[in-house]
Image (spheres, rainbow, N blue to C red):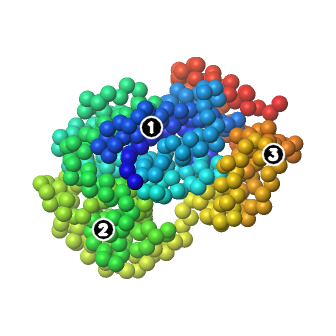
Amino acid sequence: MEQTFFFYDLETSGLSPRTDRIMQFAGQRTTMDLEPIGDPVNILVKLPNDTLPSPDAIMVTGITPQSTQLDGLTEAEFCKYVLEEIFTPGTVACGYNSVRFDDEHMRHCFWRNFYDPYEWQWKDNRSRWDLLDVVRITRALRPEGINWPVTPDGKATNRLELMTKLNGISHENAHDALSDVNALIDVTRLIRDHQPQLYDYLFKMRDKKAVQKLINLQTPTPFVYTCGQYSSANQKTTVAYPIAPAKNGNVLVFDLRYNLDEILAQEEPKFFPLVKELKYNHCPAVAPLGVLEQGDGWQKIGLDKATVEKNLKALLAHPDFIERMRSDNEARAEFPPSVDSESALYDGFLDMPDRTICKAITRAKLNDLSDFHPEFHDPRLPDLLLHYKARNFERSLSESEQAAWEKYRVERIKNSANNYIKRIQELAKEGKDSFLLEELQLWYQSLLPY
């Protein structure tokens, strides 16, 4: 099964995958040598009439709800398209901060529309790769040959539009999804060409099995770890050590930049991000300590062997602390409480009978759905089906279903209306784009109940 990359980016109505919606999807397939295959993809997705977008998001993207209604696909049409045409067998889905943002929006979109939220990233030789941490660790360990941007006050930044500008890469319309995709492909090529060995290594390490081989509790050893939660003063990179199991088969790691004896001596010690959960399937940017031996690797991240060895000894002298961290992680909720069925993706897996019904729903036409009243096992699915029918096949709703949907829709709008209007007024006072603000005002008025 031939592998290809598919670089993709989303523009959304806001930051929350649970409550916000995809408004634009853009991408480009390439060979494994980063040569384009076929035409780029650039589509809008209709913003449903139960959603008020973040005015700040619209100021950035310039995509109005009205434009998505005019030219966009419904969510059901969008899901069917990307699963059949984009995330095909052998595809490596690539993005920039995609593991934490784009992938989560996609997963919730599939959930709302009765498609499996996970298979698109693992089944039939599919996989994913997040280039943000690839950029970060390249900057930290092998920066040679690439120009790296800083903010006006001198702090390191890896913003895509600054990366491209400083390295002579065309990026004419930052925050347009397709423009960002093309820029990301060029930045990926830049890293591959200047640091091919590191590039090849990090590509292999997107596989959680490869990460588990390096970082595990059976043969624990210090390792290099680059993560956005670490300080930019040290290129977001440290030496960490696995200390205890975490939920979902993950692992807790300790930052060996710090001495535990000194931390515990503080009046109010803070343990995050000194101890954090490393998720094996999140494409973490990790490497063995040997990468620091080349050139001035230790200096680049502001550490030395003696400090790491001293801090590791202090850590291992406190098994009670390690047990406390394990217990705290076990007790901590991984996700906030679900507001409704649409935000309850991670509340559990579906059983086989429900999964069979879900597949039937994705194939059903308007007439099929009108008299379709399945006996679900999972309590999340009846509401999910009502919302699915209302957004994608409104004419399939019965009178009672229409009333139930209208009640849900109006309540959802009310919950965000005050902040929405207030923010529009604030942006108007700041002199922001008057056309976009007027469109947002008209969108709100169009959603009010008759």
- Which mark is first along the chain, 2 or 3? 2
3 or 1: mark nearer the eye:
3
**Amino acid type, label 3:** Ser
Residue at 31% over, 80% down: 317
Task: Tell me: 405 left or right of 126.
Answer: right
2 or 1: mark nearer the eye:
1
- Above or below: residue 282 compared with residue 9: below
3 or 2: mark nearer the eye:
3
The answer to whether one can see residue 211 in this image is yes
Q: Secondary structure at mark 2?
A: helix
Answer whether labels 2 and 1 touch (C-beta < 8 Å): no
- Above or below: residue 413 compared with residue 433: below
Answer whether labels 3 and 1 touch (C-beta < 8 Å): no
**Amino acid type, label 1:** Gly
**Amino acid type, label 2:** Leu
- Above or below: residue 324 compared with residue 297: below
Q: Secondary structure at mark 1?
A: strand
The percent coordinates of residue 389 (x first, y second) are 74, 44
- Which mark is first along the chain, 1 or 2? 1
Which residue is label 1 attached to?
A: 27
Which residue is label 2 attached to?
A: 214
Please state which of residues 357 and 141 is positioned toward the viewer in this rendering: 357
- Which mark is first along the chain, 1 or 3? 1
Mark drawn on residue 370 = 3
Q: Secondary structure at mark 3?
A: helix
The image quadrant where one finds the N terminus is bottom left
How crowded pointer 1 is (Cα within 10 Å; few <14, some 14-19, many 20+) is rated as many
Residue at 62% over, 46% down: 19
The percent coordinates of residue 437 (x first, y second) are 60, 24
How far is mark 3 from mark 1, CA to CA? 35 Å
